[in-house]
Image (tube, rainbow, N blue to C red):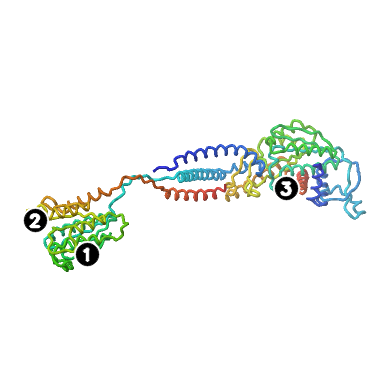
């Protein structure tokens, strides 16, 4: 709690002192005023000696005291309102309002990794706020399972359905490969990545950080329309970072190194990252690392947020003024 | 400047019919028991005259009742005892200043007394002390007395002190007199009664109370009501309290009754008037009560 016009209570105090002084001076004159304007009466002891009078007088004094207290508190809340009570907070602006497209290669060799990725994101989705997640699966053609959305219940349900489907090779839930085999060949990664890139908002003025989590082993079988490099260039052009998770990187196969190196160079060009799924790494750990890397990119500088907070004082002030009016009516001042 | 006495006389004829004024004169004449045997003349009977003063033979001749008038054996002495404390500058029950009612009542009785050839003197008193004015008979003298009262009673005057006034009278006034005490709803205590007892030995005492304002009456025109004794305002909140209003009215009437009863027991005739229009009938009632009590 802080006061924006910190000098206001001091000014009010000064005013109150001046007012009190003026009142005292006026009060001295009021005796004469009373003589001029009032109705003089004699023998008020006829009234003041009644026990009932003392009782009424006590009640009158109590009411006056309550009135004074209410007026003072109401004036105090008014002064506080005038000095603009505000709450001061340091805020780290959240950079989590991201768009994440899960771009999964669903060729037969990838289903294990895919299941883990969607499982991780299904559990992540429960704690998200403001992020949008989309899911695109591809093999020889890409299928957008669901576009970018922040309907987390839906996301979780869909991801869990796909997880079950991946784990059981399509026996339960949906047949995950539906629509992904319309092209010629298999694992047309360039086309898949290109589809994912196009799955983002066309709105280029959007400031939301965009990223793609691409799970693929990068074994291309066939001739894609876009090469991986072209797709990567498209992603770079649109400011989309691509994080690749490669399950075969670091394996013993001879071709794997060159294939992985190509993928790595492409995703590095998009300011993304490349993660090989070696024995020590698990998918959740990698997802976490990606998350941290993203968060580190977009955490803004700390900001001091000063917000006026007049509501409680206003309500209290209004109630007190109403109370004071009621008391005033009661004591007939 | 119009004289106070003239104003009193004007008001008397304004507030009372000719008949009522005659009544008052007859009443005043009959409160004096001492009479001479020197017949003066006859005049028409007015109610209040002693029945034994009726000249029956002359009445039979004339057709209207006539009473004999005697040359007064000696001058009676009317002494006006005026409470001149600032209480008397306060408001009366009618809303008029009590001072005006007091001046009118004393002026009325004084002018009737001088009309009968009696002498009138004045003793005023408050906490600032008492003062006596010499007796006199002329209109100018009455005017001077009334003016003295008028000037002495203001809101800046000292407080009332009826005991002091009575003490002064008991000590100083040796001539057998008829005393008219003019004060307000003062609460009588043992000191008053003791002094009145002393005064009664030598004098006839008439007690005229100018009724005080009803404190619980809503202020006229929303004005503040304040007590002259302490210059303290009576809060409207208190004055508008219903049960207090009822209690006050009860208490006030009890006080008025007990005051009159206690005074009667001392042989002091008393009457309470509340407004200027009350003055003439009030004075008549006072004299009538006194005449009856004297029998």
Q: Residues within 10 Å of mark 3 (few under 14, many from 20)?
A: many
Query: How far, Cα to Cα, is label 3 from label 2?
Result: 128 Å
Q: CA distance from mark 1 to mark 2?
A: 31 Å
- Identify residue for label 1: A145
* Quarter-of-image position of residue B142: top right
Please name the residue that numbered disc 3 is placed on.
Answer: B275
- Chain of the residue under label 1: A
* Residue B69 rendering spot, x and y as whole percentages: 88, 45
SS assignment at label 2: helix
Report helix, strand or loop for mark 3: loop
Per the rendering, the mark at residue B15 is none
Identify residue for label 2.
A255
Q: Residue furthest right?
A: B61
- Depth check, front residue: A137 or B241: A137
Quadrant the C terminus of chain B occupies: top right
Q: What whole-number distance in Å separates the C-alpha atoms at marks 1 and 3?
A: 104 Å
Residue at image coords 40%, 42%: A2
Q: Nearer the viewer, mark 1 or mark 2?
A: 2
Q: Same chain, marks 1 and 3? A: no
Chain of the residue where label 2 is placed in the rendered structure: A
Residue B193 appears anywhere in the view: no
10 Å crowding of disc 1: few (<14), some (14-19), many (20+): some
Q: Is residue A35 above or below residue B281?
A: above
- A95 is higher (above) or lower (below) than B262: below
Task: Judge from the rendering whether residue B66 lies leftward or rightward of residue B87; answer left or right.
Answer: right
- Callout 1 touching callout 3 (CB < 8 Å): no
The residue at the point 43 percent across, 43 percent down is: A4
Does residue B144 appear left or right of residue B252 in this picture?
right
Question: Between residues A95 and A142, which one lies in front from this camera angle?
Answer: A142
Crowdedness near tag 2: few (<14), some (14–19) or many (≥20) residues, C-alpha within 10 Å: few
Looking at the rendered image, the disc whose residue lies closer to the viewer, 3 or 2, is 2
């Amino acid at each position: 709690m802080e006061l924006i016009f910190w000098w206001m209570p001091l000014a009010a105090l000064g005013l109150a002192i001046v007012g009190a002084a003026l009142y005292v001076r006026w009060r001295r004159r009021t005796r004469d005023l009373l003589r001029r304007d009032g109705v003089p009466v004699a023998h008020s002891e006829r009234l003041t000696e009644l026990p009932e009078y003392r009782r009424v007088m006590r009640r009158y004094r109590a009411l006056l005291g309550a009135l004074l207290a209410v007026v003072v508190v109401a004036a105090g809340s008014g002064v506080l309102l005038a000095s603009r009570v505000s709450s001061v907070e340091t805020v780290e602006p959240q950079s989590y309002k991201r768009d994440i497209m899960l771009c999964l290669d669903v060729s037969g060799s990838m289903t294990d990794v895919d299941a883990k990725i969607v499982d991780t994101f299904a559990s992540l989705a429960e704690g998200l706020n403001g992020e949008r997640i989309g899911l695109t699966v591809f093999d020889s053609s890409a299928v957008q399972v669901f576009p970018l959305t922040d309907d987390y219940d839906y996301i979780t349900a869909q991801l869990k359905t796909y997880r079950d489907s991946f784990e059981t090779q399509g026996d339960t839930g949906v047949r995950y490969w539906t629509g992904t085999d319309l092209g010629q060949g298999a694992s047309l990664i360039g086309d898949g990545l290109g589809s994912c890139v196009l799955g983002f908002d066309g709105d280029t003025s959007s400031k939301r950080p965009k990223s793609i989590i691409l799970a693929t082993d990068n074994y291309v079988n066939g001739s894609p329309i876009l090469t991986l490099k072209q797709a990567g260039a498209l992603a770079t052009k649109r400011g989309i970072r691509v994080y690749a998770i490669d399950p075969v990187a670091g394996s013993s196969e001879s071709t794997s190194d060159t294939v992985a190196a190509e993928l790595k160079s492409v995703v590095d060009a998009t300011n993304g990252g490349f993660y090989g799924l070696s024995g020590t790494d698990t998918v959740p750990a990698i997802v976490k690392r990606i998350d941290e890397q993203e968060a580190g990119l977009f955490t803004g500088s700390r900001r001091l947020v000063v917000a006026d907070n007049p509501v409680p004082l206003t309500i209290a002030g209004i109630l007190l003024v109403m109370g004071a009016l009621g008391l005033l009516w009661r004591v007939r001042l | 400047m119009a004289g106070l006495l003239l104003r009193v006389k004007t008001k008397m004829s304004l507030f009372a019919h000719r008949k009522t004024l005659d009544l008052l004169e007859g009443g005043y004449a009959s409160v004096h028991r001492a009479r001479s045997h020197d017949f003066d003349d006859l005049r028409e009977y007015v109610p209040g005259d002693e029945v034994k003063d009726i000249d029956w033979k002359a009445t039979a001749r004339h057709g209207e009742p006539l009473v004999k008038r005697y040359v007064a054996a000696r001058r009676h002495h009317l002494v006006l005892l005026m409470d001149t404390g600032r209480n008397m500058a306060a408001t009366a029950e009618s809303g008029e200043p009590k001072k005006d009612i007091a001046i009118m009542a004393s002026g009325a009785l004084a002018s009737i007394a001088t009309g009968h050839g009696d002498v009138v003197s004045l003793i005023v008193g408050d906490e600032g002390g008492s003062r006596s004015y010499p007796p006199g008979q002329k209109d100018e003298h009455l005017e001077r007395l009334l003016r003295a009262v008028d000037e002495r009673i203001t809101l800046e005057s000292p407080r009332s002190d009826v005991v002091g006034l009575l003490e002064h009278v008991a000590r100083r006034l040796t001539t057998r007199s008829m005393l008219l005490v003019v004060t307000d709803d003062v609460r009588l205590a043992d000191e008053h009664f003791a002094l009145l007892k002393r005064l009664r030995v030598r004098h006839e005492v008439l007690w005229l109370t100018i009724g005080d304002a009803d404190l619980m009456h809503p202020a006229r025109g929303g004005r503040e009501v304040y007590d002259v004794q302490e210059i303290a305002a009576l809060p409207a909140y208190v004055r508008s309290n219903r049960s207090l209003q009822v209690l006050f009215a009860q208490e006030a009437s009890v006080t008025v009754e007990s005051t009159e009863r206690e005074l009667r027991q001392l042989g002091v005739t008393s009457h309470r008037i509340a407004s200027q229009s009350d003055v003439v009938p009030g004075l008549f009632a006072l004299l009538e009560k006194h005449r009856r009590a004297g029998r």
